[in-house]
Image (cartoon, rainbow, N blue to C red):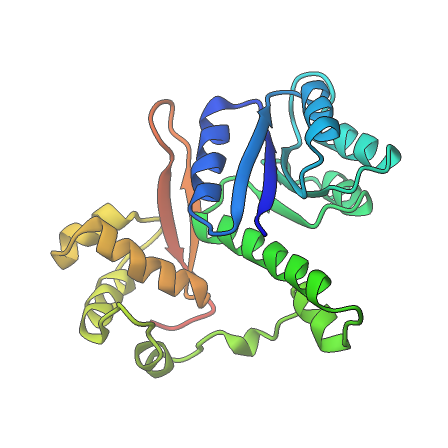
């Protein structure tokens, strides 16, 4: 059984980005969208989706207002908040009203996908189990030891997933090691001599294991650009 999703986002470019990201994650289906809180509430009330991807700052009722109304009306819908707001008060309000996750703009596809997959795991656990152990609950809440990250270069090279090549990873690492500040997959691909799409797979592998941090950089026109930066916690 798939998970129906509604997107509530006033920026058309970001809304389309959400749609593309959701379509790339198996098991999720976009069934509706809205550009403001009032319309969003009406669609949620009508379609009763399992999940809403909700922006905080919108014209009229903002995302927190909409989330509060959803809870007041007793609608059985989960919400992932997506916003550029970093204020502790806003984040706290979102959590108090039951947001299952809070994604800060700009963000990577990997972070967005992680949120969806975690929610999918939560739904599957709820559907398949009448009782949950403490371990089950910890996993659902994202309580994961940092030891799960591959903390050494040897572990990183020897644990690469199927489809990635150790020699290519070493080439990418040697170039990344020399970078300062943010860089893109296109920049690395030119230096390594392989395609941007291939390089991005290796950079995302490094992101998944904490060696890189990724963001989306929004320019004045065009699609947002994926950028990366080294995590100072690891030694390349």
Q: Position of residue 98 (x, y in %)?
A: 78, 46
Pinpoint residue 45: horizontal percent, then vertical percent.
Answer: 75, 28
Q: Residue at image x 58%, y 27%?
A: 33
Residue 119 in view here: yes
Residue farthest to the left, as pictured:
193
State whether residue 77 is above or below residue 56.
below
- Taking the spot 46% from the left edge, 65% from the top edge, the residue there is 210
In the depicted structure, whether residue 5 falls above or below residue 125: above
Indicate the position of residue 141 as horizontal and vertical percent values: 70, 63
Marker count (numbered): 0
Locate residue 17: give its quadrant: top left
Can you see residue 141?
Answer: no
Q: Is residue 8 left or right of residue 192?
A: right
Q: Is residue 213 left or right of residue 177?
A: right
In front: 150, or 98?
98
Q: Residue at x 49, y 43 (%)?
A: 22
- For the C terminus, the image quarter is bottom left
Q: In the depicted view, which residue is nearer to us: 200 or 74?
A: 74
* Along the viewing direction, whichever of 91 and 129 lies nearer the viewer: 129
Q: Is residue 137 left or right of residue 13?
A: right
Residue 134 horizontal/vertical position (percent):
77, 76
Which residue ends up furthest to the top in the rendered image?
A: 60
């Amino acid at each position: 059984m798939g998970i129906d999703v509604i997107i509530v986002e006033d920026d058309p470019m970001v809304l389309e980005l959400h749609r593309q990201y959701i379509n790339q994650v198996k098991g999720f289906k976009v069934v509706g969208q809205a550009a403001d809180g009032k319309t969003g509430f009406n669609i949620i009330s009508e379609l009763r989706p399992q999940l809403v991807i909700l922006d905080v700052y919108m014209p009229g009722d903002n995302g927190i207002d909409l989330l509060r109304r959803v809870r007041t009306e007793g609608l059985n819908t989960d919400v992932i908040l997506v916003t550029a707001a970093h204020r502790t008060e806003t984040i706290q309000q979102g959590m108090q009203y039951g947001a299952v996750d809070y994604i800060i703009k700009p963000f990577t596809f990997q972070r967005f996908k992680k949120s969806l997959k975690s929610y999918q795991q939560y739904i599957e656990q709820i559907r398949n189990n009448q009782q949950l152990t403490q371990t089950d609950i910890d996993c659902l809440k994202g309580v994961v030891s940092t030891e799960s990250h591959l903390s050494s270069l040897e572990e990183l090279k020897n644990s690469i997933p199927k489809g990635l090549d150790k020699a290519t990873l070493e080439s990418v690492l040697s170039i990344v090691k020399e970078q300062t500040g943010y860089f893109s997959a296109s920049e690395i691909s030119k230096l390594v001599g392989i395609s941007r799409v291939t390089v991005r797979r290796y950079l995302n592998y490094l992101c998944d294991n904490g060696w890189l941090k990724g963001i989306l950089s929004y320019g004045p026109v065009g699609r947002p650009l994926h950028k990366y930066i080294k995590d100072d916690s690891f030694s390349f």
